[in-house]
Amino acid sequence: MKRYYLTPLFLMIFLIIFTIPAQAETQDLSITFPLGGENMAVGSLQTITWDGYRDYELDLFLSTNSGRTYDIYLGSGIAGAFRWTVPDITTDHARIKILGEISYLTRAPVSIEAVSDADFAIGRVPEAPTGLEAMALSPSEMQLLWTVNSDNEQGFSIERNRREVVTVGPGAQ
């Protein structure tokens, strides 16, 4: 019968692996961007960032209803960042969820999660107006006409010499 003896080095390694908790157990996962209140343009390239669990690959999801459901899978990221192209979905109630599963040597995997706690907006950038025409009405008055090419502008700013003169509401021509 063979006898096995535990050497002091083996015993020390065994104790380190099986008795000291893994570093991941003490981490918090928190989203650092977007935090809420941001306006993201459809088609723009954005980066979602987070603190904690930077060495793990995590999955990211998008909600368009203030976090009631997260049914749009964006992809997976590592090292605290994920670059994505904002989808063609317009909403004032977008939020992000980050999910992951952390594996340990000594116990079952643990699920981790972070969710946005405030909404951000996703919208289309308005198309620029075209066909600007200017007609002098008097030495101190001008009439401006243009073609509105969008349905989501919030108004127009009229400038002279790079200074705002007046703003007009949406749909003005």
Image: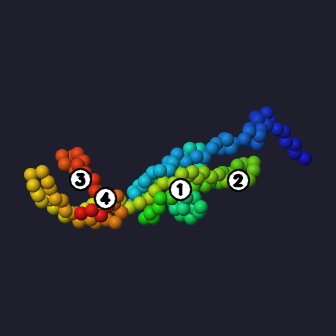
> CA–CA distance between discs 3 and 1?
35 Å
**Which is nearer the eye, 81 or 40?**
40
The amino acid beneath tag 3 is Ile
Residue 13 seen in this snapshot: no
Q: Which residue is mark 2?
A: 109
- Label 4 secondary element: loop
Q: Which residue is mark 3?
A: 158
Q: Which label belongs to residue 95?
A: 1
- Image location of residue 58, percent across then percent down: 58, 53
Say above or below: 101 vs 147. above
Q: In the image, 121: left or right of 164?
A: right
- Label 1 secondary element: strand
The amino acid beneath tag 1 is Arg
Say above or below: 151 vs 95. below
> CA–CA distance between discs 2 and 4?
56 Å
- Label 3 secondary element: strand
Q: Point out the frontmost of discs 3 and 1.
A: 3
Marks 3 and 2 in Cβ contact (< 8 Å): no
